[in-house]
Image (spheres, rainbow, N blue to C red):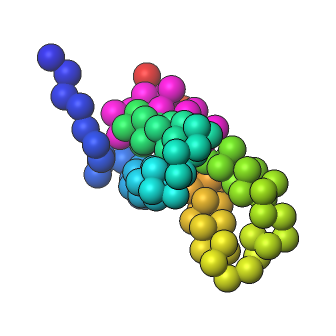
Amino acid sequence: MGEHRFINPSQPQTLYGATLLCYIDAVFGLLGSRGHAVGLLLAAALAAGGFGIANEKRWGYGLALAAACLQVLILVAVAGLAVLGFPLILTFMFDVLLVALLVHPMSRDYQRIWFR
């Protein structure tokens, strides 16, 4: 019987940080979605992606990357240049940080070699 993890401290720090940030983004996405289907789906995708990354699954990495990129695109499409204003810039920074952690060469190389 396989062991499932919620975090994997043996992964590179970029993937470990991305996993934690996926979970944090999912929680805040649930709180801020106000019942909107897109927000709920993004939160679920980020949580599932984080779980997949922690368990070294390729689908988890792909799902987390797709959800993180979609989250950034939706934020920019909805807010436009207002995303650079005070309250939204914090959300924008964390969303871009998640994408950066996932596409970092250390993360990409590790998932390419070790993920199943």
Position above or below: 49 against 13: above
Along the horizontal axis of the image, is 80 left or right of 25? right
Residue 1 appears in the figure: yes
Along the horizontal axis of the image, is 16 left or right of 34? left
Question: In the image, which residues are magenta?
Answer: 54-67
Along the horizontal axis of the image, is 80 left or right of 31? right
Q: Residue at x 72, y 57 (%)?
A: 75
Along the horizontal axis of the image, is 74 left or right of 28? right
Residue 85 x, y percent position in the rendering? 74, 80
Q: Residue at x 46, y 50 (%)?
A: 30
Residue 69 x, y percent position in the rendering? 68, 46
Q: In terms of secondary structure, what is the magenta stretch mainly?
A: helix
* Quadrant location of the N terminus in the rendered image: top left
Instruction: Please identify the quarter of the rendering in which residue 92 is found.
Output: bottom right
As for residue 10 lying within the magenta part, the answer is no
Residue 52 x, y percent position in the rendering? 41, 33
